Amino acid sequence: MQTLLNRLAANLGQGPFVADAQGKYHLRLDGYPLFLTPRSAELLLSTPLVSSRASGAEEAHDPALLKRLLQQVVAWGRHTPHALVLDELGNLQLEARLALEWLDEQLLAERLSQHIALLERLEPQLTEAALAPQWRQMIWHP
């Protein structure tokens, strides 16, 4: 596992990746934060999807936006191992579980590329949702 990550770091022109206290590797590729977390038989690749208006829990997950995003997940499933998930704090993130048994340097680079492509596709939708005015019906009483 460490050899695989060292080769990836060398190919990206970076120094060796070092895990934090929780065992996560923090990468920044094309401006996106990527987290690699080794598990028993898999490598978890994840990125938090942050909307700039995610101030309240009820506002953070607009049902129409979630529906649109989840419809896209079905299409991704045919080509990539990625999914949209909620972390332990209820924050939306893009995640892929990669089996270590079959993972090599080329496949890891391909999965990272797919991950970034999906982030680039999701970002405009999340930004648009964050900037959309939040209309609330008001009733005027004289």
Image (spheres, grey):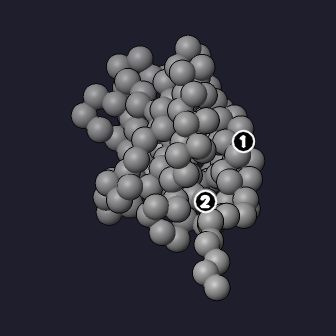
- Residue 40 visible within the image: yes
Q: Which of the two discs, 2 and 1, sits closer to the camera?
A: 2
At 55% from the left and 14% from the top, the residue drawn is: 78
- Residue 13 visible within the image: no
Q: Quadrant of residue 135?
A: bottom right
Q: Tag 1, which secondary structure?
A: helix
Q: Residue furthest left?
A: 40
| Residue tagged 1 | 120
At 38% from the left and 55% from the top, the residue drawn is: 90
State left or right for residue 99 relative to residue 125. Answer: left
Q: Quadrant of residue 111?
A: top right
Image x and y of residue 34, in percent:
54, 49
At 43% from the left and 41% from the top, the residue drawn is: 85
Image x and y of residue 42, in percent:
34, 30
Image x and y of residue 103, in percent:
45, 23
- Residue nearest the viewer, comparing 39 with 76: 76
- Residue nearest the viewer, comparing 32 with 91: 91
Q: Is residue 107 above or below residue 51?
A: above
Q: CA distance from mark 2 to mark 1?
A: 14 Å
Q: Residue furthest top?
A: 78
**Mark number, residue 51:** 2
- Residue nearest the viewer, comparing 38 with 57: 57
Label 2 crowd (10 A; few <14 / some 14-19 / many >=20)? many
**Residue type at the position of mark 2:** Ser
Q: Tag 2, which secondary structure?
A: loop
**Residue type at the position of mark 1:** Glu
The C terminus is located in which quarter? bottom right
Label 1 crowd (10 A; few <14 / some 14-19 / many >=20)? few
Q: Is residue 111 above or below residue 134?
A: above
Q: Residue furthest front?
A: 142
Image x and y of residue 80, in percent:
55, 22
The N terminus is located in which quarter? top left
